[in-house]
Structure formats: C-alpha cells, structure tokens
Amino acid sequence: MSEKHLPLWEVFIRSRSGLAHKHCGSVHAADAEMALQAARDVYTRRGEGNSIWVVPSGAITASDPADKDELFAPALSKIYRHPTFYEVPDEVGHM
Amino acid sequence: MATTSISFSETPLLNLTLRRADDALILGHRLSEWCGHAPIVEEDIALANIALDLIGQSRALYDYAAQVDSSGLTEDHFAYRREQHQYRNCLLVEQPNGDFATTIVRQVLFSAFMDLYWREMMKSGDESLAAIAAKAEKETAYHLRHSAEWLIRLGDGTNESHARAQAALDELWICSGELFESDEVERSLIDAGLAPDCGSLQESWQNRIQPILREATLKIPSTPFMQSGGRCGRHSEHLGYILADLQYLQRAHPEAVW
C-alpha cells in the first residue's frame, strides 16, 4: 500500500457526551472524508462512540522517547501534586 | 434437492416482503464475497459492515414473511429452501462483484433507491414494515454515503479508475430500470397505503444520482433499453451460483441448527 496515496490518520473517539475524545488507533485513507468513514467502520462497530475526530498523523508532533528522563522523571517525586488531599463534591461529576 | 423446497401461497404482502428480503440477502451475500479480498483492510471491514447490515435487514424481513405466511415456516425456510424462480430480488443485486468499481456502482444505484424506498415505507400502514424501514433507512443512508464518496473518487481519480467506473456504469445501467417497476402485485398494497410506489421514486432517485455522477465526471449511458424479470423470478445465470453457495448446508442437512 502506498503511503503517498493513502496516508495515515490518527483516530479519536468520544464514547459519551461530556467525555474527551480518546485516541483509539489509526487508519489509511486518501482524504479526510474517507478517513472519517474508515474510522467509523473500523472503530465504532460495537457502539463505541458518538463522535469521531481524524487527524493526519503527520500533523502530530510527538515527544522523543529518548527525552523521557528530562521530561517526565522530575514529576515522579512530587506527590503533593496529586489531588488526593481533597474531597471532590458529587456535583462536579466526571473530571 | 427439489424434495426439500418449501411450498407456500404467495399473497401480495408476502411477495412484496420477499422482494425486499431477497434484495437484501443476495446483495449482502455478494458483498460478503469481498471479505478478505478488498483493496485495503479498512474497505474490507467497510464492505463486511454493509453486508452484515443487509443480511440483518433480510432476517427481519424473512421473519416477517414467516409471520405473514403463518403456516409454520421460518425465516431460514424462506432464505434457504426456495427454488431460483421463487426468488424475488432485482437483477442488479445478483450481478457479479467484478472489479471494485463495479461493486461500488452497483451499491450506489441500489442504495440511492433503497434509501428513498425505506423513507417512504416508514409511513406504511403496516406497522412491522414501517419499523423495519425505520431501522434500515439509517443503515442505507450510510451505504449510499460511503459508496457515493468512493464513486466520486474513482470517477474523478486516475485515468484507469475513471475508465473502470464508467465501464461499470455502462454495464449495470440496464439493471437500474427494474427498480422502479410497480406491477399488479404491488398495486393493491400501494393503494392500501401499505407500500411505496417504486415508480414514483424515479425522479428523486435521478436527482440523487446525477450530482454524484457529475462530480465523479461519469456519463449516464444513453441506451434506453432496460433489463427486467427478477421480481417475477426470471433471473440471470448468476443467481443459481449464488444459491448453490448459499443453500448448500440447508439442502445437504435440512433443518440443521447450530
């Protein structure tokens, strides 16, 4: 399959109103409309979603795995950033 | 094999139900032949999805046919235990898959018609048919959207994809006229408000097809001749091969369940 004619698209599905779109995989497609349809056919066959985003994979800027120490290790020792010291009122709903 | 065929009295309502059921079953079977063979895996799944929608529609319709018949026959009897001349599907749906363009053209012509048909059927005085139509219409609207987008890309794509799409349209066009025939069998049901008049849908169908073909840079063939016969059991040679495949198990092991 030619990546030039059928580039890769990343697929994000929102399962319920109010929740965020979540990355669930990728599809090959010629353009945005066909990518949307491919995503619908491949990833929502079991009623997984009620909204789909497709994004050209090339439009995503990703962090370099080699940078993981400098990017992520400093957060590991800062337990006070976890909001475990607060009680979230029920009215807030999904966070 | 003939010994295990069913016999039944084909009232207009049963005949009409079988026409819709057979269209869905035969096209669903045709599309299932693509499984594992489509050009890309995404489309393999898309065609299988459409096939499953259609087979699901046929099940609901055969189940209703069994209720209308009310002699103890089941959906499986209607699907698998009739002779070729008892099948009521149109000729379009039994045409071979050909290349991908042929499959897509067949789907556009059929889905554009069925979407209009189901929309009208939702107003039927027959509650069962109206309910089946309401579910089928949503599925069919997507079948049309999917196949129309493909046809636009094939027709307005490369020289080769354009040539293949035009050849497919030239070949299948003569099967499109049969969709709009409404004969004596349907007349009484149309007059009673139980079924749409297929003939009345032709103009809306053309209004849907024409912009798609225009965008796809495809030309409607000028031949006025239209092939027909499927609704009264005069089928092309292709249906026999489909039925041999489809009916093998129930013919070899009547009443088999699993």
Image (tube, coloured by chain):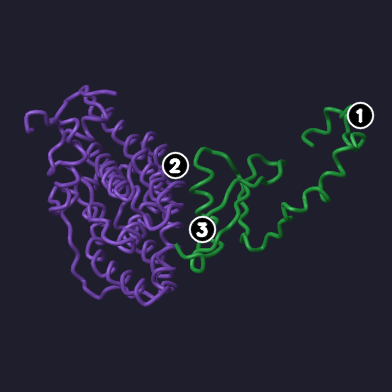
* Disc 3 residue type (three-letter): His
What is the x, y in percent for residue B26?
A: 26, 46
| Cα–Cα gap, marks 2 and 1 | 49 Å
At mark 2, the secondary structure is helix
Count of numbered tags: 3
Of the 4 image quadrants, the one containing the C terminus of chain A is top right
Quarter of image, res B150: bottom left
* Disc 2 residue type (three-letter): Ala
Sequence-earlier tag: 3 or 1: 3
Nearest the eye: A21 or B192: A21
**Residue that badge 3 annotates:** A28
What is the x, y in percent for residue B174?
A: 22, 65
* Disc 1 residue type (three-letter): Tyr
Q: Residue at x 41, y 59 (%)?
A: B147
**Residue that badge 1 annotates:** A86
The answer to whether any part of residue B191 appears in the image is: no
